[in-house]
Each structure stands twice: as structure tokens, then as C-alpha cells.
Amino acid sequence: MISEQSWADARVLWDYHQMHHELRPCSVAIGLGSHDLGVADTTADLYKRGMAPLIVFTGATSPTTRERMPRGEAVHYRDRALDLGVPSSAVLVESKARNTGENIQLSRLLLDGAGVDVASVLLISKPYEERRAYATTRKLWPEVEVVSASMPMAFDHYTDSIGDSRMVLDMLVGTLQRLLIYPVRGFAIEQEVPDEITAAYERLISAGFTTRLISEKS
């Protein structure tokens, strides 16, 4: 049973994790692989709306996606986009990345190899990964402008769509922890984390939402 306080704290983190960027056309759209096909749906929609002339889907598999996406997250994302009407000529696939840093680094190498001039990136992720994906890209690819995007969805609707509320709250907590510790490790730029965000995060940890936390030892 999730308490009312934990639900309230989760909503605070949910809103913080989203960058609320205004969408605009970019050189390329990069869809970050995960268990959530909504990323592929959003990327395809933004392509069809003229927000980018080219898509890169990036991602291998993880323990979460190995059974659902056995050919790799990026490959399944590409299939989804083609089903939604995106032409195959507009999609590049990077199928080796196993974390967000590799998503960015390997996508950049793929685009360089294809001779694509990239001045700006439309970065599509799960809603609660927007800020971390942004911070990672700004660290690893500082010369490009980054516009963060995700499927526009209310928190309650998202948790219902996933079907596992505890997992979503665990992910919100784990993602914030990475925002706090990854700048020290050189994986991301530092982000301002207001006191109310930290307080909500610490209450959720005390309430037991800890399965996605990682060791803070460098």
C-alpha cells in the first residue's frame, strides 16, 4: 500500500524530472531505448510533425527489456516507428548502448559516420528521464543544443499504463539519485535540486522505494 505522502512526493519528483522545454525543430531526434514503447511513439509523432528530419533509436537490451524486446530496444523502436508511418530512410539504429552515456556517445559516433551535421538534438526519453538525459547529453556533447521531450502524460495515467506503481516510484527515486551523484563522477552536468525535491526524495527512500538506488561509492 502506497501512502498519500509517498504519492504526493512522487508527483513532486515527476514534475521536477521533466524539463518543460518548448519544442522546436532540431537537426536530429534521438529516442532513448527503454521498456517504454511510448518513447518510440513520441519520436515518430515528432518526426511527422516536422521536428526533425532524421531519427536515431539507441539501445541494446537490459534485464527489464530482454524478454519483451529480444532483438534490442532500438530495433523494436524502429519497427514501431515504421508501423506508425515513418519511412525507413529516416531512421538510424544504434543497437549496442546499455546506459544513457553510451546512448549519447554511440549515437554521436553513428551520426558522425553517416556524415550528419548536428547542431541541435531533440532528445526523447521516458517522462521521468528527461532531466537526467539532458544533463548527460550536455556533459558528453556540449557543443549541441538539446531540447528534451517525452510523451505528454499525467503522472497517474503513466503509472496506470505501466501497471506497477511501486516500480515507477522506485524509478523516480533512482533517477534523482543519479542526478545527484553522476556530476561528481563526470557523467552529467550538475543540476539545481531545490530543497523540496531533496526532501521528497529522502521521504521516499525512508518509505522503502530503494530498489533502483546504486552504490554511492565512486
Image (cartoon, rainbow, N blue to C red):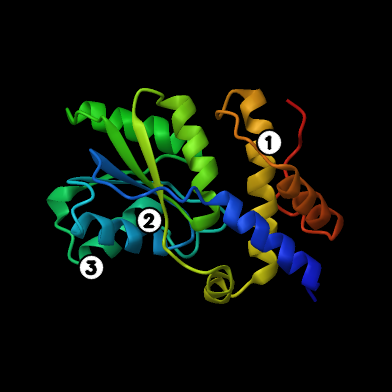
Let me know if residue 167 appears in the view: yes
Mark closest to the chain's N terminus, 3 or 2: 2
Residue that mark 3 sits on: 84
Residue type at mark 1 is Leu
Choose mark 3 or mark 1, whichever is in front: 1
Residue type at mark 2 is Arg
Q: Residues within 10 Å of mark 3 (few under 14, many from 20)?
A: some
Residue type at mark 3 is Leu
Q: CA distance from mark 3 to mark 2?
A: 19 Å
Q: Position of residue 135 (x, y in %)?
A: 51, 35
Q: Is residue 146 left or right of residue 45?
A: right
Mark closest to the chain's N terminus, 3 or 1: 3
The residue at the point 68 percent across, 36 percent down is 180
Q: Quadrant of the N terminus?
A: bottom right
Dot 3: element: loop
Q: Is residue 36 left or right of residue 44?
A: right
The residue at the point 66 percent across, 70 percent down is 165
Which label belongs to residue 71?
Answer: 2
Which label belongs to residue 180?
Answer: 1
The residue at the point 25 percent across, 41 percent down is 26
Q: Position of residue 118 (x, y in %)?
A: 24, 30
Choose mark 3 or mark 2, whichever is in front: 3
Choose mark 2 or mark 1, whichever is in front: 1
